[in-house]
Every structure is written in C-alpha cells, then in structure tokens.
Amino acid sequence: MICLIALVVFGILGIFSATHRKIAREAFECVFKRIRLKPCDSGLDQRLKSQIMGKLLRRKPKLARFTFRHFETISWIFTILMIVSIIYSGIGIFNFIIYGNCDGENSQEACVYTGLGDVFKINVDCESPLCQNKECSCGDEIGCQEREGDICKESCYIEGE
Amino acid sequence: MSLNVQKIREDFPIFKKQTSGKPVIYMDSACVTLKPIHVINAINRYYKEFPACAGRSIHRLGRKVTNEVYNSRKTIQKFLGAKGINEVIFTKNTTEGINLIANSLNLEKGDMVLTSDKEHNSGLLPFQLLRRKGIGHEVFKLGDLNDFQNKLNKNVRLVSTVHTSNLDGTSNPIKEIIKLAHENNSLVLIDGAQSVPHKEINVRKLDIDFLAFSGHKMCGPSGIGALYGKLDLLKKLSPFIIGGDTVKNSTYVSYEEEEIPERFEAGLQNYAGIIGFAEAVRYLTKIGIKNIESHVIDLNRIITKRFCNLGIEILGENEPEKRSGIISFNIKGIDPHEIAGILNESSNIMIRSGMHCVHSWFNANNLKGSARVSLYLYNNKEESEVLVEEIKKICKMM
C-alpha cells in the first residue's frame, strides 16, 4: 500500500525534482505489478518502511513500535484517506468551476477556494440557477457585477474582485 | 598485540565526516572496505606525477610506471609468500581470476569441478557455464571434509572453493582440502576474497595451486585484484583474454605469446589501481594481518554474545572465532532489508542485507536472506556497542 501513496506523493514532487521522479517511476512499477497480482520486488516498500521506522525509532521508540506493528493497517488507512480526499477535491474543483463555490449549488458554506483571486476568476454559466433572470442570488460570499463584452452581462464573481 | 584503533581511524578520511550529526559506522567491509589516506595518496600520485603506461613506452614516465608496477607485483608476491614475481597476475577482481582459471584450464568433456555449497556467484556461475561443454559440476558442504571426500573422484580435475564464506564467515579447512585434492590429482583454486584480508596466507606452505582475491576488500581501490598461480601450472593455461601486451609479435594469421604474467594481462592495465593495491597491502602488512584477525574476532565475540542474549539467530558457526569478522543474522518478523534500512536511518550504521550473491545457498535453504555485519580493522568496541543497542531497540519494536 505504501507504494501507492509513494506514487502519488513522489509523482507530484517529481514534477519539480528528478530525484523524486526516479522514486515515482519505481513506485509506479511496483503498483503496476501489484495490480497484476505480482509481488513488488523492487524493495521500494521496504526502503520506505525502514526510512520511516528508522526516523521514528530515533525520536519516538514507542510510536515506532506501534507503527511497525500496524504498518500495513496504517498504510491502508492513509491510502483510503488519500483516495477519499482526492475524490472530495475533485468534486470541490468541479463545483467551483460550475457554480463558483466548491461546496455546490446554492451553498452558503465557506469555500476553501474563495479568495484565491484572479487565478480562479471564472464566469459562472449564465444558465446557472445563480444567475437566472439576470439576477444574482449568490449569497454573501459572491457578489454581482456587470462587465462589458461578456456574453452574459450579469454574472457571478468571487467577492472582492 | 592489540590494535590502536583510534590511531588507525585517523588514517581513514571518511571518519572525519558526519551525516545527520552522527559519525559513519561502517560495517560492510565484506563488500568493500574503506580506504586509508595512504592508498588515496598513492593513486593520486600516479595520476599527478606519472600517468603513463607500463611495459611499452621507453620514455621517463613510461619507465617510472613500469618500475612502480614491478614493485607492486613484488609487494604482493611477498605478501602471499609466492616463489616468483611472475606468479602474480593482476586482474580486475576475484571474479575475473576465477573466470580466467575456469576458461583457461583446458577442462574437457567428462571432467568434473567440485565447489562448496556456499560459493559466491563468482565462484559458482563460471562452472555452471562449463556444463555446456559437458564439464560436470558437483557441490560439497562447506567445512564438511567427509562430504568433500565422498564427492572427490578421479574425474574431479579442479576443486574450486571459497576459503572464507562471505555469507556467514565460515572457513573451509583448506589445508586438508588441498591435501586430499592433490592426492586425487585434482588442482585447487581458492577464492580468497574474504580470507586474504583477514588471515595470514602463505601459498607455498598451503600448497595452493591458484588463489584469486580482490583489492577492494583489503583497503585497496576497486577494479583491481590478483590471481596467484604456480608457475608451472600457469604455463599450461590457454590464453583467456588476449590483445595488447599479451603477445610478443603477431602476423595476420598467428601470434607469439608474451611471457607470464603479461600473457594474461590484456590491454592497458589499471596502473593507479595496481599501485594503490600494493600500497594497501603494505599498509595492512605494517599493521599485521594476525593483529587484524584477532581484533575483528574480539569484536565479533562482543556482538555475538549480546546478539545471543537477544535471541537473534546467527547463521553459520556458533563460535565467533570461526566466523572471522562476519555476523550474518536474522530477526524473526522483520525483513533483513528493513533491519539494514533502519540501522542506516537511525544511527548511520551501514550493513549489508539480502542474499550477498550466494543466492544458491539461500534458495536451497528457503531463506529470503540475512542482515550481515562485517568488521575490519577500523571498527571499534564503541561502534559494536552502538550496533547492539540499535538492534536491541529493533527487537523491542517487534
């Protein structure tokens, strides 16, 4: 399981660093083998495990003992958490693009993306219920603005822009 | 005489370095040893002062290298107790030495080669390859003279065996093996990669026919080794790798072989390595191989005793005296690679893990491998204590 986590983590780090790219590739090979029900024989899982255990053993021996004994379970928990968080992040991004709020349609909840500024300055679809009849009802978080040149004159924008 | 380890450690620049605020604890000397400054300086001297080729050019630098190589060969000849300087052939390493004999001995279909069950792949695979030519190969149990005698028959032309196993440090009784083999008219090739750095070996007293060993396991540079062979036997060998400097003359259809040992040293040689190798031999000789041997056994004794108290399973002989500087062990419930990784991460202790190139033995015994501590002259009691404490923590963690 640790190889799957390594694939995601080092895959992202690998965008910026060649060293991590090598580990990501190794992790990918390992995951690919596991998918085909073959054993991962690169030793990456052992290396990662021993690095974690070595660091823990030096600082927190009791925690090291607990982690070592339940390493597979902990790996599973982290894997599930990672998958769940990826799914939630995907839904949030989708909502943000479509509705301008990561929590979904008509939500009044605070959005983690709110306030990100120009990076996420996206027009909400004019057909969106938020902008029906050229009247915005976006709640406190989102204001209404008129912009020349836009297909839809009135639209919803993130507050403060 | 006990070693002044503190003074010895000053010769090794690596000990001045720290990683994560901790000094290096190097216990993987059965793989490669650390290098003293003397060896590093000798190598540098070649590159700085006379980076030319030996045995070919007559200019001043060429003559200087030729002399240096001659002196190096002489040093190694004396170290081994060999009769003549031309009985020492420079090779890349032990592997090349064994391959040279396997391929040059003119073994024929129906001949047999006897090896031990704990051969390094370098001492096993060359003979597996010979099976294609119809040359048989049989295995005897290391250290078991009865088994050796049972396997010895008139077809056995060569006994090729490891002296000290890199797997667990166990040594073969080579004196008896050589005697029995010679009585059977078989030749003996000794893999001395682990024993030459740790034991006093006199090839003439032991009546060894061939002995292969490496520089990198005895404080020398990597990429250099030596093969000892009795001159009359070397003369009977066919050339293995031929080319530059292995012939006196050649035409489009024939060549005249060079004298021994040059006949077996094809192409431009690793002169820096040869000079560094000889310097390492001088360094070890000055300290005393016997002193080194008793020092590593002392350390082995400390570690073995403490490991036994922790209930750790040690491979090979029970007595540390019979395992030289090697402690190959397993802790139930943890992979050997994890042990090595944890030691490296937690305290900078560097040991080897896995099958140590002796896959055949581990596979035959259904073992995944072992963690291996291998000691040398620069290791001290403090390091041994740190190792034991860290292993204790790992055991508690289980």
Image: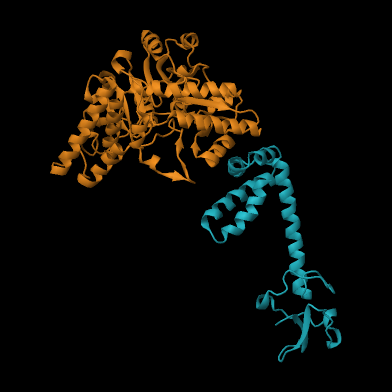
Residue A45: image x %, image y %?
Answer: 62, 43
- Whether residue B237 is visible: no
Instruction: Write the residue at 63% across / 55% down.
Output: A9
**Front position in the image: B330 or B159:** B330
**Front position in the image: A135 or A36:** A135
Instruction: Write the residue at 83% across / 73% down.
Output: A108
Q: Is residue B259 left or right of residue B295?
A: left
Is B60 drawn above or below residue B236 in the view shown? below
- Chain B rendering hue: orange
Chain in cyan? Answer: A
Using the rendered view, name the quadrant where residue B9 is placed. top left
Residue with the most extreme bottom position: A148
Residue B270: image x %, image y %?
Answer: 29, 39
Using the rendered view, name the quadrant where residue A51 is placed. top right
Residue B263: image x %, image y %?
Answer: 25, 30
**Front position in the image: A41 or A111:** A111
- Whether residue B358 is visible: yes
Using the rendered view, name the quadrant where residue B191 is placed. top left
Is B292 drawn above or below residue A69 in the view shown? above
**Front position in the image: B293 or B122:** B293
Q: How many marks?
A: 0
Where does the C terminus of chain A fall, quadrant-wise? bottom right
Residue with the most extreme left position: B59
Protein image colouring? by chain
Q: Is residue A2 left or right of residue B374?
A: right
Residue B173: image x %, image y %?
Answer: 42, 13
Is B326 drawn above or below residue B146 in the view shown? below
